[in-house]
Image (cartoon, helix red, strand yellow):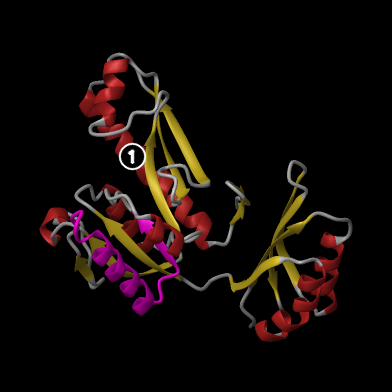
């Protein structure tokens, strides 16, 4: 039995793209399982994601045959095995709730990933409540003087393990521009988001002092612009005047968990396509 494939593509919008793609798959005996597309009229760009059963045609033959269509339309495209777990490098500091949640979802089969390593700027004891199992743990402390060296070590671990995605699961260090560029489009961060936005220490306490009525979180790709990368997923929750700072922290942890997990799932399932400073997210 053939393994389902996922074709994702983007290019300048023009008539006939959908017909060419679906006709190509039909002519080769492919059975489309799910198809979504988006025509961005503000940028005249076209985006598409197709899951299909290639029947008896191998991935290499599909790739070779589609290359001419991709060239004709100047497509940025990718052909992937749908069910292959992606190799993921997880980074964490002292707050390990997002890490624990991701590992739990992975263990029950909810996230199609293969955790290849965990990197932290704190010792293993700092996250002693989280079960890591046999996942390799790397303690890489960082200071202002050693930051570039530490980041080079992270890149080497990612290269040695074949990591396809880096997840900052509450990794409380700002990546250098070089590091952000190196992992462009394959590094996801989780960030608390309020209105107004509170930066610095104890954001939930700041929110309490200002009497906010909503708290939330944003998962986004990392760029050189701090916390301003393309957004993948967001969520918010109403709160009241009766909520203490500690209750905001508790609720914030829950929101961060589910927002990051959903963003990671969407990326792993090839459902996120970059569109300049934005993303196109084909939910499923």
The residue that label 1 is drawn on is: 254
Is 81 drawn above or below residue 142 in the view shown? Answer: below
The picture places residue 260, in percent across and down from the top left corner, at: 41, 48
Q: Residue furthest left?
A: 125
Mark 1 burial class by Cα count in 10 Å: few <14, some 14-19, many 20+: some
Quadrant containing the N terminus in the rendered view: bottom right
Horizontal side of 95 relative to 229 (left or right) equals left
The picture places residue 152, in percent across and down from the top left corner, at: 30, 69
The picture places residue 99, in percent across and down from the top left corner, at: 29, 54
The span shown in magenta is 142-168
Quadrant hosting residue 24: bottom right
Q: Is residue 166 magenta?
A: yes
Query: Residue at (28%, 28%) from the top-left corner?
Result: 204
Is 75 drawn above or below residue 180 in the view shown? Answer: below
Asked whether the viewer can see residue 281, the reply is yes
Q: Residue furthest right?
A: 15
Query: Residue at (32%, 61%) from the top-left corner?
Result: 90
Query: Residue at (27%, 15%) from the top-left corner?
Result: 242
Horizontal side of 266 relative to 151 (left or right) equals right
**Along the line of sight, the residue nearer the viewer: 263 or 29:** 263
The picture places residue 264, in percent across and down from the top left corner, at: 45, 55
């Amino acid at each position: 039995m053939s393994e389902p494939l996922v074709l994702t593509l983007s290019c300048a919008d023009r008539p006939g793209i959908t017909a060419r793609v679906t006709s190509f798959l039909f002519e080769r005996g492919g059975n489309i399982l799910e198809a979504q597309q988006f025509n961005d009229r503000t940028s005249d760009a076209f985006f598409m994601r197709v899951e299909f059963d290639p029947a008896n045609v191998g991935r290499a033959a599909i790739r070779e045959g589609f290359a001419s269509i991709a060239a004709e339309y100047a497509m940025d495209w990718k052909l992937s095995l749908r069910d292959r777990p992606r190799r993921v490098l997880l980074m964490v500091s002292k707050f390990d709730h997002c890490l624990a949640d991701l590992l739990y979802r992975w263990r029950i089969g909810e996230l199609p990933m293969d955790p290849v390593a965990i990197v932290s700027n704190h010792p293993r004891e700092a996250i002693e409540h989280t079960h890591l199992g046999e996942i390799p743990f790397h303690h890489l402390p960082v200071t202002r003087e050693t930051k570039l060296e530490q980041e080079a070590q992270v890149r080497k671990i990612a290269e040695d393990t074949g990591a396809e995605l880096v997840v900052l699961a509450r990794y409380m260090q700002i990546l250098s521009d070089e590091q952000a560029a190196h992992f462009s489009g394959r590094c996801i961060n989780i960030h608390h988001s309020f209105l107004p936005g509170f930066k610095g220490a104890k954001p939930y306490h700041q929110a309490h002092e200002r009497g906010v009525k909503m708290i939330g979180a944003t998962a986004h790709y990392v760029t050189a612009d701090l916390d301003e990368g393309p957004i993948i997923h967001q969520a918010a929750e109403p709160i009241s005047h009766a909520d203490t700072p500690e209750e905001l922290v508790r609720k914030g942890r829950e929101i961060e968990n589910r927002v990051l997990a959903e963003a990671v799932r969407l990326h792993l399932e090839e459902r996120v396509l970059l569109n300049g400073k934005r993303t196109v997210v084909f939910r499923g």
